Image: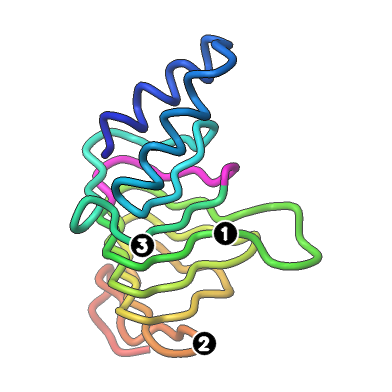
Amino acid sequence: MLQIFRISHWAYVAGIPFLPRFLYALNRVIFSVVLPPSLVVGKDVLFGYSGLGIVIHARCKIGSRVQIGTNVTIGGRNGHKEVPIIEDDVLVGTGAKILGPIVIGRGSRIGANAVVLTNVEPGATVVGIPARPIRSIVNSTPI
């Protein structure tokens, strides 16, 4: 699944007209994942269960060593042009929704089914609807 995306992204950057959309559709049909060719994905990114049910906006940026669970949505919000940026070493739990012009800080963790609508500080763990921090790994104190 990720290899198909990487080829699709390479073809998109190279300006090949038909191949990126074909590979995007192939990924969608076979793996039920929405990974547009224009998406920027870092190294060693892991999509749980081959990306089953994952939907990511075309302008999102995902850093390296990010783990994303199944049924995750990363996208925009009505009235905002910007989309989420996910920095390196982030863990996104199953079913989480990350929406709007926000930044998910390096090394943070998003709990399962959390709805994240605001920035997440580096090293923080957020859970709930809407997501709220429960502790910070940097200073190990409850928030």
Q: In the structure shown, which secondary structural element does the residue marked by tag 1 occupy?
A: strand
Tag of residue 75 = 1
Viewed as shown, does residue 122 lie left or right of 116? left
Tag 1 or tag 3, which sits nearer the N-term? Answer: 3
Q: Residues within 10 Å of mark 2 (few under 14, many from 20)?
A: few
Residue plotted at (22% across, 48% down): 46
Type of residue at label 1?
Gly
Task: Measuring from the top left, give residue 54's x and y in whole percent.
Answer: 38, 58
According to the picture, the residue beneath numbered tag 3 turns out to be: 53
Residue 17 appears at what percent x and percent y?
A: 59, 15
User: Which residue extends farthest left?
Assistant: 49
Q: Residue 106 location in percent, x, y?
A: 36, 54
Left or right of 36 on screen, residue 125: left
| In this rendering, position of residue 83 left or right of residue 21 | right
Question: Which residues are the magenta region?
Answer: 58-66
Q: Whole-Å distance between the Cαs marked 1 and 2?
A: 16 Å
Q: Total marks drawn?
A: 3
State the separation of the CA atoms marked 3 and 1.
Answer: 14 Å
**Amino acid identity at mark 3:** Gly
Tell me if mark 3 has few (under 14), some (14-19) or many (20+) residues whose alpha carbon lies within 10 angstroms of its own.
many
* Contact? badges 2 and 3 (CB < 8 Å): no
Circle 2 sits on which residue?
A: 130
Q: Amino acid at mark 2?
A: Pro
Characterize the magenta stretch by its predominant secondary structure: loop
**Residue at the image position 48 percent from the left and 89 percent from the top:** 129
Check disc 3 and report its element: helix, strand or loop: loop
Q: Nearer the viewer, residue 69 or 43?
A: 69
Q: Nearer the viewer, mark 2 or mark 3?
A: 3
Location of the N terminus (image quadrant): top left
